[in-house]
Image (cartoon, rainbow, N blue to C red):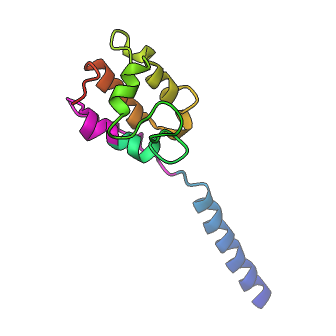
């Protein structure tokens, strides 16, 4: 009798675990919100400061281009990394969206930088 009760309890426990193990969690797709007007200083520089502008990467005196707050816009322009005629063909955008810097960026940052280029890549 005791063995049967333990067997029933174990069977019930396995059923509960089995049903909950098959549950799928719904993952909401990421919603990317880009401001209507993208500011270089207010929107793009913070992305560079968080992901690019650090020692050994694209800080002043490190790997080119210099993406430090004071030099980023001038260096991007001087090196021809921005193409306002065909923004998606800008070397900066290609590098972060599909190129060597892709692992350091994300879809939201890519969309923000692309929109900044589409809006003329202003030093605003």
Q: Residue furthest front?
A: 61
In this picture, is 94 found above or below 101?
above
Image coordinates for residue 17, horizontal then vertical, percent: 63, 66
Please indicate whether residue 78 sits to the left or right of residue 103 in the image: left
Q: Is residue 1 visible?
A: no
Residue shown at 56% from the left, 26% from the top: 99
Residue shown at 73% from the left, 84% from the top: 6
Image coordinates for residue 72, horizontal then vertical, percent: 37, 33
Q: Residue furthest top?
A: 85
Image coordinates for residue 19, horizontal then vertical, percent: 60, 60
Q: Residue furthest bottom?
A: 2
Q: Residue furthest right?
A: 3
Which residue occupies the foreground of this view, 38 or 5?
A: 38
Count of residue discs: 0
Image coordinates for residue 67, horizontal then vertical, percent: 41, 36
Which secondary structure type mostly characterizes the magenta part of the structure? loop
In this picture, is 57 found above or below 73?
below
Q: Quadrant of the N terminus?
A: bottom right
Q: Quadrant of the C terminus?
A: top left
Which residue occupies the foreground of this view, 68 or 14?
A: 68
- Image quadrant where residue 12 sits: bottom right
Please indicate whether residue 13 sits to the left or right of residue 77 in the image: right
Assess whether residue 28 is covered by the magenta stretch: yes
Please indicate whether residue 96 sits to the left or right of residue 114 in the image: right
Residue shown at 26% from the left, 18% from the top: 120
Assess whether residue 21 is covered by the magenta stretch: no
- Image quadrant where residue 5 sits: bottom right
Q: Is residue 80 visible?
A: yes
Which residue occupies the foreground of this view, 76 or 28?
A: 76
Q: Which residues are magenta?
A: 25-45
């Amino acid at each position: 009798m005791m063995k049967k009760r333990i067997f029933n309890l174990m069977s019930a426990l396995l059923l509960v675990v089995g049903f909950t193990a098959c549950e799928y969690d719904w993952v909401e797709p990421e919603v990317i919100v880009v401001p209507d007007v993208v500011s270089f200083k207010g929107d793009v520089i913070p992305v560079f400061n968080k992901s690019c502008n650090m020692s050994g990467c694209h800080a002043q005196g490190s790997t080119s281009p210099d993406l430090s707050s004071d030099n980023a816009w001038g260096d991007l322009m001087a090196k021809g990394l921005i193409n306002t005629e065909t923004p998606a063909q800008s070397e900066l955008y290609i590098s972060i969206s599909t190129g060597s810097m892709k692992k350091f960026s994300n879809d939201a940052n890519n969309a923000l930088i692309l929109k900044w280029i589409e809006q003329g890549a202003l030093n605003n």
